Image: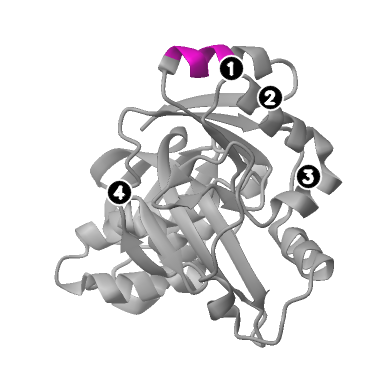
Amino acid sequence: MALPSHCAEETALPVPCKVNLRLAVGPRRPDGYHDIDTFFLPLPEPCDAFFIRRFDEPGDIELSCSDPELETDDNLVVRAYRAFAAATGFSPRLEASLKKRIPHGAGLGGGSSDAAVMLRYLNDRAGEAALAEPGLATLALALGADVPFFLLGAPAMATGVGECLIPTDPGLSGWHAAVVCSPCHVPTAWAYAALDAARTFPAKAGASLLTSVFDANRRAFCVTGAPLRNDFEPVVFAAHPELGRVKERLLALGAAGALLSGTGSAVFGLFRQRQTAVMALADLSGDGPRTFLASL
């Protein structure tokens, strides 16, 4: 008769999200990707939550999720586990429960962050099989362009497809981010295709285009010497005008700057005073948007 499994460890882990303080996008490359110049800022809210049970014997991952539609082998958490196991041979049996609070399709990187937390969890327990940071980052990039940033876990400027990271202090300590997540979903592939269709580039390399001076945002709020900018705003706001109205409202309610995050649909505002941010979110909350407050 088989002996009962022994749970070696139970771990609860928070999963942060991100916003982009800047997102400049170059033309489509021959490989289908785009060069970007971005500034990633991690936020503690909204966050997902992991509860992981690790067993002594080798095996696979069993993932349960508060959103049953995400309980598939194509989930980035499952893919991260299996990619790490294939690369290292370390494959403990895991029961992983994921509570989703980061909205899907909001430009906040929830799936990428989930994957990064799983990679870090496994690498911290892999002993002699653990990967050095460059190898772990390479594994992360194969899962998604944002995953290496979430492995880093700190504010960073990023180029390439987002994998060339330079940790950078944005100087926002003591500030507050008000995040507004509207019900609409903006598919990333659609946003890139719409951006490509909406503009033309001069005949020069995409990387050099991203070194030009950034366009001034209305009531521009400067971070690291450049105003807030997101190249996706014109096409996303045209398709979803309610998101543009959220940005306008955040500015009217006292945000020093406001911006679409990633390809959307989340819009965030930066506030010097917590109470002002709280009042702004109270104005914007209701039956539609989900709102979150993050202290930086």
**Residue of label 1:** 280
Say what secondary structure mark 2 lies in. Answer: helix
Query: What secondary structure is the magenta-colored segment mainly?
Result: helix
Q: Is residue 277 magenta?
A: yes
**Residue under the point 46% across and 70% down:** 159
Q: CA distance from mark 4 to mark 1?
A: 26 Å
Q: Which residues are magenta?
A: 275-281
Place of residue 258 in the rendered image (x, y in percent of width and height, measured from the top left)? 58, 36
Q: CA distance from mark 3 to mark 4?
A: 29 Å
Say what secondary structure mark 4 lies in. Answer: loop
Mark 1 Cα-neighbour bin, 10 Å: few <14, some 14–19, many ≥20: many
Relative to residue 185, is residue 47 drawn left or right? left
Q: CA distance from mark 4 to mark 2?
A: 28 Å
Q: CA distance from mark 3 to mark 1?
A: 20 Å
Relative to residue 212, is residue 241 drawn left or right? right
**Residue of label 3:** 237
* Mark number displayed over residue 25: none
Q: Earlier in the sequence, mark 3 or mark 1?
A: 3
Q: Quadrant of residue 92?
A: bottom left
**Residue under the point 32% across and 51% down:** 153
Q: Earlier in the sequence, mark 3 or mark 4?
A: 4
Quadrant where the C terminus lies? Answer: top left
**Residue under the point 54% across and 47% down:** 228
- What amino acid type should be assigned to the residue bearing mark 3? Phe
Relative to residue 196, is residue 121 drawn left or right? left
Q: Examine the rendered structure and indicate whether residue 235 appears above or below residue 203.
A: above
* Mark number displayed over residue 249: 2
**Residue of label 4:** 169
Say what secondary structure mark 1 lies in. Answer: helix
Quadrant where the N terminus lies? Answer: bottom left
- What amino acid type should be assigned to the residue bearing mark 4? Asp
Place of residue 164 in the rendered image (x, y in percent of width and height, measured from the top left)? 40, 71
